Image (cartoon, helix red, strand yellow):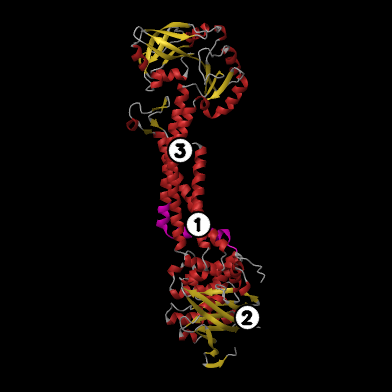
Amino acid sequence: MALLTLKDIGKRYRQGEVEVQALSGINLEINEGEFAALVGPSGSGKTTLLNIIGGLDAASHGTTQLNNIDISALKEAQLSDFRLFQLGFVFQSYNLVPVLSALENVELVMVLQGRHKKECRQRAHHYLELVGLKEVMQRRPSALSGGQQQRVAVARALAAGPRLVLADEPTANLDSENATALLDIMHTLSHEDKTTFIFSTHDPRVMDRAERIITLQDGKIVNDQEHHHEHSDKHEHIN
Amino acid sequence: MNVHKHSHLPFWMLLTLAWRNLWRHRKRTIITLSSIAIGFGLAVLSIGIGDGSHNSLIRNAIKLGEGHLTVQPRGYLEAPANHKYLEDGLALSKSMQTLKLAGTIEPRISLQVLSSTANNSVGAALEGLSHENDPRGIMLSNELVKGEWIKPGDLRGIVIGEGMARKLKARVGSKVVIMAGKKGGDSQAQLGRVRGIFNSQVPEMDDYLIFSDIQFAQRFLEGEGAELSRQPVTRFAIFLDDPDTLYHWKDKIKAAVESKAVIAMDWQEMMPQLVQFIAIDDAGNYVFLLLILIMVVFGVLNTVLMSVLERAREFGLLRALGLSRRSLLMLVFCESLILSLLAIVVGWIVGGGVHLWFSQHGIDFTAMIGEGGNVMMGTFMDPVIYTELSWDRVTQLTTIIFIVTLASGIYPAIKAARVTPVEALRT
């Protein structure tokens, strides 16, 4: 049974006088533990799709099921709680709360989940150590580099124990060294924690780290294939 | 889906975030706090001056007038007349003395008279005071410009104001014939001799009042048919040691002396014009207070709203991570709450400091109001005003500022809670 199932997802919105078809006929299944990349040119619908999966935006039609929960049927307050307990997010930039230290940022989501203070601290320490930020965890975001900030965001997303982590162009603002380093960390953690990752990118070096590449164009999935970067062999994915 | 788990922003986290957010723009917060504190200081000062001057006016009016409480014939205030008097002053005085009142009870006689010298005649009010302890006598004896105050047992001596002395062309030692109408239509007269002339700067007093010993005035009541052995008086003026006990003693005195013929009234009932004047003057102060409150509202609104508008993206992030709308609303509201609490603390340090200084050193208004400018409503205000602030005022001002600053945070909080994650994150 797939962790995530999208059925006939479509999204239209108005931009001034023009009606834009951002997504249409999206059918997708993602299994537990997958490390999948959404790729495609700007405006192909990557972010919109991630927003719909993350319950941040509503689809015009179709259903989204995560862990047997129909996200499309949830009310706003339920969606908010759903995101808190089921999902992890890594955004392109401005991921962190500026007035909180790296450690506190990682703790925040767990605190909101109602976890015990001690547990929050232990888990935050553990994940910050895993992303290699043990030495700087007391610093506020303004005292961290862009790469470090993104790693804090990854640690935050994973520490909260989500079923699925959504990352919207997490490396867009990073140089290639930091970008590949971040992807390596995400990849390792996804294997260790058996956490499912879906991230969008149009960076070929980042794509190379993905185990499955879903290509979007004009709001449609035009290609979906497994990708074993060790051997560079590709298998068509049956949709 | 049945969502069993809900997001929960613990109070300590709410406070941590709110406190740190408030100090994100240190300068802006300090400027806002300073402006509120200065406004608050001004409000405290203006209200302190208002209350100080009003209380000074009231204290003088009570001393010069008929005391904190007055016992007099029923109907006298509405239509004063020489034949309206308390026949048995002795009995009333005894029944009041049994109350063991904290203050003094002064018997007085007031009569409408005509005073004449060889040169002129003018209408006047003869005020018979019991002895030298009457606060009115003590106060006016300080305003004597010529001669001396009436000595106890001086049954001919009178003291008049400068205005009347001018009209009568009287000096110290002059004889003045004082004539009073009787109920039946006849008249009676007594001869007085001017012992002193005062100048209170209050024309209503200087032009109109003649002071004498109470026994001198009692002769007129005797002419009306009163028995001197029962010590007839027009009224008793009661001066309390502690003005705050007014209503306590008013009730007791009412119970002790009131009858069909006798009424006990407090100073507010005796001087409704003064009460009205103070209410109007207070209204002016409230307008000033309102302006300060508007300033405070815009100060808080500006600070919190600015910080909300520039954090739209951050709020979007928090909402995306799973912070509920309610928690976000609480967070921004908590920032306003902390700001208003800080404003009150800083405000009281500034306002309280200003008040303490001026309550000790006073503000000298002599130059501003000039000679005689401090006279109003038949009484006068001390030219040096010491600010006064009662606990009621402290509570009132604190509550108003607190509610107003807090209310200014409502709109920004609602605005923050309306942020939708997608739109905020897109910016």
Q: Nearer the viewer, mark 1 or mark 2?
A: 1
Question: Which quadrant of the figure contains the N terminus of chain A?
Answer: bottom right
Residue type (three-letter) at the residue carrying disc 3? Ala
Q: Main secondary structure of the magenta part?
A: helix
Which residue lies at the image location 47% right of the left edge and 31% below the top edge?
A: B276
Asked if both marks, 1 and 2, belong to the same chain, the answer given is: no
Gap between marks 3 and 1 measured at Cα: 29 Å
Residue occupied by mark 3 = B283
Query: Does residue B31 show up magenta in the picture?
Result: yes
Which residue lies at the image location 44% right of the left edge and 71% below the top edge?
A: A144
Task: Indicate the position of residue B346 as horizontal and vertical percent values.
Answer: 45, 48
Asked if both marks, 3 and 1, belong to the same chain, the answer given is: yes
For residue B393, side relative to residue A83 (left or right): left
Residue occupied by mark 1 = B411
Mark 2 in CB contact with mark 3 (< 8 angstroms):
no
Residue B105 appears in the figure: no
Question: Which quadrant of the figure contains the C terminus of chain A?
Answer: bottom right
